Image: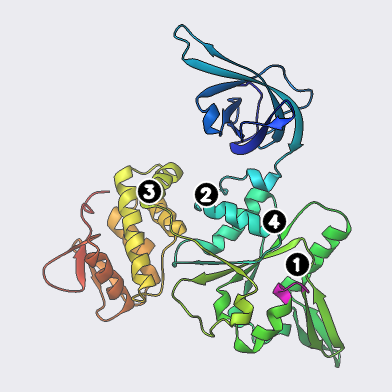
Amino acid sequence: MMSYDSEQSSTAVVRIIAKGVAMADLLRIRASNGAGITWQFADEAMAGYDVVVDRAPDIAIHDGDVWHVELVNTESRGKTGRRKVATVRLVARVSTLQPWQRVTALDDHWIDPIDLRVLLAWLHAGVDVILIGPKGTGKTSLGYALCRTLGWQEPCKVDVAVIKKTADLFGVEAAAQGSTHFVRSALHDYLERAHVALRDGLDTQFLLLFDEINTVHAASTSGLHGFFDFTRQVTITTTSGPKTVRIPPNVHALGTMNVGYAGTFELSQALLDRFEVLRVGAMPRDLEARKLVKDTGISEGVAGGIVDTARALRDAANGNQVSFAPSYRTCLAVARLITAGIEKKPAFVRGFLGYYSGDIRIENGMIVVQPNTEAAKALAALRMKGVIEAKDTAADVATIPGSATR
């Protein structure tokens, strides 16, 4: 164990060199904030060795640094001689991790750690990515969490469903004082900010978030090809003539798609081919419940009931039974109602079921919904999953277990 301070948890690689020849294949460094740095051989021949450094280097060691080292000595220590120790000398630092490579989690957003590494590697390489996953898994909010964590500019969210032609992305023709002129869109202004940042040498990045990109209108699909290919530019027609909009290299793009949903207009193969696809999943049930406890202070039991309700409705939405899939934000809203003193049953009804069409109310301790509505389908999905209990035989009446108390 070494006592050098480090910034955050990460893993790096050091190559072992003895007498000018590489010997033990790899030496891994694992560091955790405030706990120093632990060195561990990866080569099986050196397995079980504790690693010490004969003297501190002249420059600081950071998480993820890659060093050439020289093997100085190996010995057995302890009363039984079972503790094997290898002494190494740091020769030269080969490289250091960039800040994005040190990111192991996103700010207030869950994503599988491997998926996060893949996403960061692609974005750093200038690759545009489409996130595909079930409804309610936070694909859109992931983009915002990514920018918060990396210190990028807040994303520019583009609702492609309202775009009828490519030029609509960048502005509209407006009439004023007997003449027509082109008024730039928020997206156009965002790109201009990125150009200025690049010109002025500002170390910042920008993110375009194309929400539900598979709803893009067929008429604008082909015009977007240049936006995402190596040319990184789109030419549009305005009243004042053709205008070329260029996307600078400090701008990245994320698209989102709900799994199993083809979209209003099927995404063309040519446009899809300009992206890499990353499938993202929902936060594990127990992790989501623990996060809810941490964020709101509610009991574990109530948190589990909230999460189970949300997951049942997400399944119903992904099966096209209902239109809305509650995200973690919805769970948070329900939990906050309960912590504010609202009883469990009305908190669930107001927090979860208000999104669905159809009258819904509480009568004599029972949830009553209007038959043959989306709200009734949502309630039926909860009964089917065992989240709530059916009362009597009416299909539109149910109770939440334990809802008589808060």
- Pick the residue in front: 393 or 105: 105
Q: Position of residue 394 (x, y in %)?
A: 15, 73
Asked if residue 21 shows in the view, the reply is yes
Q: Which residues are magenta?
A: 227-232
Which comes before the other along the chain, label 4 or label 1?
A: 4
- Pick the residue in front: 383 or 195: 195
Badge 2: few (under 14), some or many (20 or more) residues near its Cα, within 10 Å? few
**Toward which corner of the image does residue 39 lie, by quadrant?**
top right
User: What separation in Å lies between label 4 and label 3 (alpha carbons)?
Assistant: 33 Å
- Pick the residue in front: 190 or 332: 190
- Disc 2 or disc 3, which is closer to the eye? 2
Q: Position of residue 165 (x, y in %)?
A: 68, 87
Residue 124, disc: 4
- Disc 4 or disc 1, which is closer to the eye? 4
Please state which amino acid type lies under the numbered disc 2: Pro
Q: Split into 4 quadrants, where in the image is the N terminus?
A: top right
Which comes before the other along the chain, label 1 or label 2?
A: 2
Q: Among all residues in the image, which is located at the extreme top?
A: 79
Q: Secondary structure at mark 2?
A: helix
Q: Position of residue 23 (x, y in %)?
A: 64, 31
Residue identifier under label 1: 190
Residue identifier under label 3: 289
